[in-house]
Each structure stands twice: as structure tokens, then as C-alpha cells.
Amino acid sequence: MRFYVLTLFTEMIEQGLSHSVIGRGIEKGLIGVEAVDIRDFTKDKHRRVDDYGYGGGAGMIMQAPPVYDAYMSVRERADEGARLLYMSPQGKVFNQKKAEELSKEENIIILCGHYEGIDQRVIDELQPEEISLGDFVLTGGELGAMVVIDAVSRLVPGVLNKEESFEDESFSDGLLEYPQYTRPCDFMGRKVPDVLLSGHHENVAKWRRRQKIINTFYKRPDLLASAELSEEEKRVIEELKNKQYGGIY
């Protein structure tokens, strides 16, 4: 899998993704990340890529020609079916399901806006899929692009070691993750649950599944509506509701 990031700040992308799991994935050749400097495609002698917006208003707007030319230079090297994303607060909110979908792609191009945004005409011409991290505004799209690359890359086979498997992580099955513990067994009077010390794998698995449901119920109950639950697990939720609301809900 290869990512092409169209940006004004290539060093931010390169340095931000060169460490830890993603850095190892790059070293192994399992993923590739290329930061493409949009400034290289401007015809302005001062490498300027922005200008004042028509109609007035505060802030500068990224010009359409250098953005378009940067994209076309990448598309010539990537296949024409490469997925084009645009990091935008107006886009659909990024989640684990989208990360799993994108992990099936071979080439992904991510466009990072800056200043007050990008000339709408190049957005209309390229028709990117707009992606948002949530209902807030960042200075530029670079941080968002790195989040997407990180979340997608760790789903590519071989990027994570066996010890780092994502199978039991939050959102992998629509639920939050269970609590994790390590040594010492007793920390300030708080002890590791006995079941985790028992060595009984089936009981450990049952405990973890129950804890995932409990965690999700209290922290992200909205996720339970779409989670696949057994009848026994549904009864656990009813018990939690009774406990929380005294049987009235």
C-alpha cells in the first residue's frame, strides 16, 4: 500500500510517520508514504500558492492550479483508480469501519488544505472523498492525514507484530476494549482481577468479553445499537440498565 500526501509541509508528514509501528512498516516495504510539496507546482517565483479570496473575508485561499498539477503528477505514477481523500471539517467523520475499507486499497492520495481552505473549483474538478476527524477545525490537514495513515496502515497485513494484533482492540468488533493489566499484581491496594491470574483461557476470554460490554455501556452506549450481541450479552446490558436506572428506563 502506498500513500501520497499533497501538502505544504512535507517535513511534518515525513517526520511524523517515521517512528514506531508505521516507521517499521515503511522499513519493511509493506507501506510507502510520499509527501508531495504543492509549492513545487506553482509558477510564482516566490513559490506562493495562496491568494486573497474573491468577495473579501479574512484569510488566504490555496489556489487551484498548483493543487491540480500536484495531483496530476501523482496520478501519473499511481494507478488511475487511486483513492483521493481530502481532509476537511465538512467531510464524513473518519472511523474504524472507514479505516478497514481503506486498508483494501493499493494507492491512496490525501490532499491537505491550509489557510482558509482550497479554491472550490479544484475540489469540484477532482471530486475527492472528504474526510473529517470530528466537529472541530485544525490549522491544516496534515495532522488529520497522519491519523488516517496511522489507522489504515496498522490494518495492512504484516505491519503489526503478533503481540500488537488489532483483533481485540477498541472498535474491532464494534465495542470498546477491555481493561488491561501488567505487573505488579498489587498497585496501591488495587489488585489485578483473579481471573487473569488463573491461567484458564476460556474464563479469561469470557471475562474480557463481558468487560468490553460493560466499558461500552458506560463510555459509548451509542455503539451497542449496532454491535453483534448474544442473548446472554443482551441480558448483561439489561442488568446494567437496571443497576444504573433502578429498573426505570
Image (tube, grey):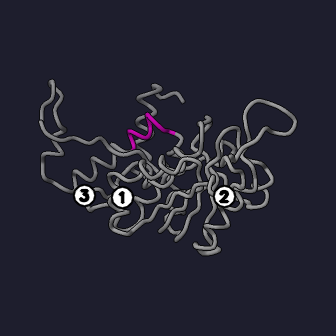
Q: Nearer the viewer, mark 1 or mark 2?
A: 2
User: Residue lying farthest front?
Assistant: 45
Q: Position of residue 52 (x, y in %)?
A: 78, 38
Residue designated by label 1: 167
Q: Position of residue 63 (x, y in %)?
A: 74, 49
Residue bounds of the magenta highlight:
213-221
Identify the image quadrant of residue 50. Answer: top right
Tag of residue 221:
none
- Judge whether residue 212 is colored magenta: no
Which amino acid lies under the numbered mark 2 shown in the image of this protein? Phe
Q: CA distance from mark 1 to mark 2?
A: 42 Å
In percent of the image, x 59 and y 56: which residue is there?
6
Kindly indicate the quadrant of the structure image that contains residue 185. Answer: top left
Q: Nearer the viewer, mark 3 or mark 2?
A: 2
Q: Which mark is residue 41?
A: 2
Look at mark 3 in the image and give the residue it sits on. Answer: 163
Q: Amino acid at mark 3?
A: Glu
